[in-house]
Amino acid sequence: MTTLKVGVIGAGSISSTHLQAYSIHPEVELAAIADLNEGRAQEKAERFGIPHIYTDYKQLLADPAIDAVSICTWNNTHAEIAVAALEAGKHVLCEKPLSQTVEQAQQVEAAVKRTGKLLLVGFVRRYSDQVKLLNKYREAGAFGDIYYAKASIIRRLGNPGGWFSDKERSGGGPLIDLGVHMIDVCWYLMGKPKVKSVSGNTYRQLGNRSHVEGLSFYQAADYDADKKRC
Ligand SMILES: NC(=O)c1ccc[n+]([C@@H]2O[C@H](COP(=O)([O-])OP(=O)(O)OC[C@H]3O[C@@H](n4cnc5c(N)ncnc54)[C@H](O)[C@@H]3O)[C@@H](O)[C@H]2O)c1
């Protein structure tokens, strides 16, 4: 059996989902992990028995034995790391969003074409039971020609704080975080049509509700639950 040697870049919350899945896959060997925060990388390496730890992802990419990487870092680094990984000859599973700008996404697309390597964006909701079922109906033609789709999502539990609300690391608010999943599900279920134009509105109306008594406790508990659902 051929084994795929995988490296994981970014050792925060979502990396656990990647690491858990890789660790039980019979054809995958977890080869290395990288994070700017060495302690985090160390902790995950110990938990999943990963032999190599790096604080610079470029060192991980320099290992010719690694076939593929997961990119589990903040949004502002996805495109840069994806291009570097593809150029280093690795297949890539990149967390959503692919990038913060269209130009960056086009750079990644060009790198995929140049290198012939595979890249998948972590749009996990395509693989939910509901979407799989709807997709079966679509493939069977049960919906006829789909010419209109509408989806909505609301982050009910407030601003999660941390890097999510840091414009530099996130690049946006709920739209770039959860909205991309909804846009992807619509596009996917419509049969991935070629997009002619996109328009949208974004708003900056978030209030600072830190004065509301008990809110920080409420948010911390519900934020954990919310993240599990993402
Ligand atoms: N697919 C989903 O449904 C889903 C769910 C949750 C998060 N995500 C995505 O996963 C990404 C990470 O989210 P998180 O909640 O795990 O964040 P996190 O802050 O818990 O972890 C990110 C880690 O990346 C590290 N990092 C950042 N830049 C780095 C670099 N240049 N080199 C090495 N390490 C670097 C940080 O030190 C941190 O440990 C985000 O892009 C988010 O949108 C996707």
Image (cartoon, rainbow, N blue to C red):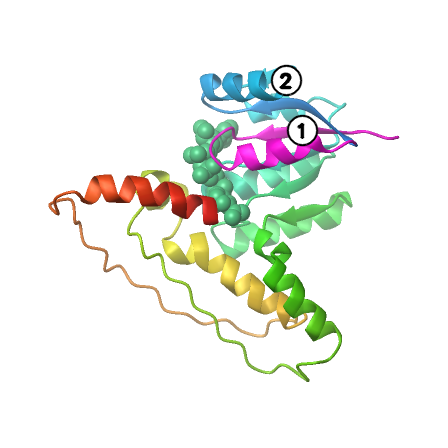
Label pair 1/2, CB-CB below 8 angstroms:
yes
* SS class, disc 1: helix
Query: Is ligand 1 within 8 Å of the beta carbon of the residue shown at mark 2?
Result: no
Q: CA distance from mark 1 to mark 2?
A: 9 Å
Q: Where residue 221 sits in the image (x, y, percent)?
A: 31, 40
The residue at which mark 2 appears reads as 49
Q: Where residue 72 sits in the image (x, y, percent)?
A: 54, 37
User: On residue 23, which mark appears?
Assistant: 1
Who is closer to the viewer here, 200 or 115? 200
Q: What residue appears at the point 73 percent right and 45 percent down from the top-left corner?
A: 118
Would you say residue 166 is visible in this rendering? no
Query: Is residue 147 positioned above or below 120 on the image?
Result: below
Would you say residue 156 is visible in this rendering? yes
For badge 2, the amino acid type reads Gly
* SS class, disc 2: loop
Who is closer to the viewer here, 139 or 41? 139
For badge 1, the amino acid type reads Ser
Q: Which residues are magenta?
A: 1-26
